[in-house]
Amino acid sequence: MPTYLSPGVYVEEVQGGARPIEGVGTAVAAFVGFAERGPFHEPTLVTSWNAYVAAFGGFVADTYLAQSVYGYFANGGGSAYVVRIGNTSMENGSAAPAAEPAALGGLRVAALPSAGGDVSVEVADADGENPPEDRFKLLVKQGDKVVETFDVSTRKNVKNYVVTQIRERSKLITATEAQGGALARPENQAVTLPAPAPAPNIPARLATEEYVGDLDERTGLGGLEAIDEITMVAVPDLMSAFGKGLIDAEGVKAVQMAIISHCEQMGDRVAVLDPPPGLTAQQVRKWRQHEAGYDSKFAALYYPWIKAFDPATGTNTFVPPSGHVAGVWARTDVERGVHKAPANEVIRGAIDLQTGLTKGEQDLLNPIGVNCIRAFPGRGIRIWGARTLSSDPAWRYLNVRRLFNYLEESILVGTQWVVFEPNDDRLWSSIRRNITGFLTEEWRRGALFGRTADESFYVKCDAETNPAESIDAGQVVCEIGVAPVKPAEFVIFRLSQFSDSTSLVSE
């Protein structure tokens, strides 16, 4: 209370009206995976693809972190935290050297990192009598077996130009044209390609603890615990490790359960999970029900994998969908709001799907919480599901879970001023007024269900919720109920024949 000691006019600032509660951010992703370089400790904030490249390098063959982060930003993601895992004993920033290309005249040919060893290339005559001088046949062998055959040309303006054909079709080699001069047909010969360098900083074996990490060391998932603004977590390189045999099926399940446990413990984020690659609809149904029987309102699963361009190999390759999906979540939050189900949205950068799904196959997957990605003629590749992995109908829909995360975090941050205030009716009234104002605004934005604000929510903070025992314990209790909007997942039109009987009556 101010003290007045001499006559005069005094101007004082006093708190009036409600203290506004501002909505927190809902679109901040976290990624855990392998990178070309960058720190192993402390999650790194990146706000664009260029920022990621500056901190962690570019695309790396046989890994999915860079692909996922790129897909995240391409689909509308705004910011993300990246945690690098791998062999922490290796020198930070070191990367394995690329294999030296072999010369076939003016053509430079090298083995892809995914090819393994014992790859050779043979130049032979094109089929037919008197073929043009620019035409020849390229045979790619692994051991003694021919695994790829290309009928190509040295002319750049034709469809079967050698560099283009190998870039688009080969899974074992890359080809580039040597600088200077026109490309001539190489002589008939065979060359063995140097073994490709392994993907940088990927260990021979990964333990589950590598993903789980440590809070004190700020590694793995443990490094994400200290960051409040994260709202979604993806670990796309879990599947690259599985594909390379660095971790087995039991390890995949253990890591995904650790991701879910992390999100449940934090209570303000949702896990975006990927299935193993190459599964049919029946196989993913079996995997979901028997091997990965997760039951959590803080996790969502998307199937199938999507095909995207991979600059590391110059080809289109299948990648797990989690990074692209997280970007769609962020885009939907910005354009419509977190209450809108992030479905019926186009996945930017998706060229094709690893498995094309029919309606009948989705009928098997949707009830068990598998969010399908489907291709529709004339409408592109879209997310066609918005469910969590929870068996509780109250938390079936993903947008409901994320809306509650948003409301809870916003109210938590916006009412910090309440701590140590006198616990009386004036405080209770202020709390009711502030939270009511915030929820009314959310109702106006369409986040809550009801024709009026009174039908959409209630806020109770009075002597009934705060008896003497609670006051003596230093507690102030506020009870809040909200009615979230739920998606129109099944749109049903009932049609029937109608006959105007009055027209049959003669006048």
Image (cartoon, rainbow, N blue to C red):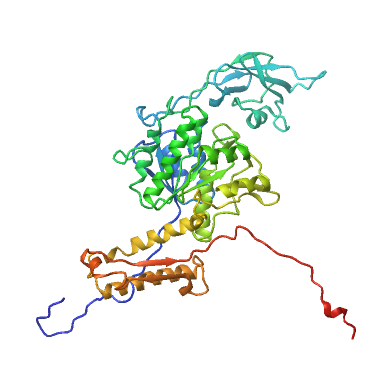
Q: Residue at x 31, y 69 (%)?
A: 465
Q: Nearer the viewer, residue 257 or 375?
A: 257
Above or below, 337 against 230 in this view is below
Q: Residue at x 52, y 54 (%)?
A: 396
Total count of labels:
0
Where does residue 495 sit, x and y in percent of width and height? Answer: 74, 65
Q: Quadrant of residue 284?
A: top right
Above or below, 504 against 350 in this view is below
Q: Nearer the viewer, residue 117 or 403?
A: 403
Where does residue 482 sit, x and y in percent of width and height? Answer: 45, 66
Where does residue 225 sit, x and y in percent of width and height? Answer: 35, 46
Q: Quadrant of residue 314?
A: top right
Where does residue 504 sit, x and y in percent of width and height? Answer: 87, 78
Q: Nearer the viewer, residue 299 or 318?
A: 299
Quarter containing the N terminus: bottom left
Query: Among all residues in the image, which is located at the extreme left?
Result: 5
Quarter containing the C terminus: bottom right
Q: Quadrant of residue 411?
A: bottom left
Horizontal side, residue 415 vs residue 378: left or right: left
**Does residue 188 show up?**
yes
Horizontal side, residue 157 vs residue 388: left or right: right
**Does residue 57 show up?**
no
Horizontal side, residue 30 vs residue 353: left or right: left
Query: Among all residues in the image, which is located at the extreme right?
Result: 506
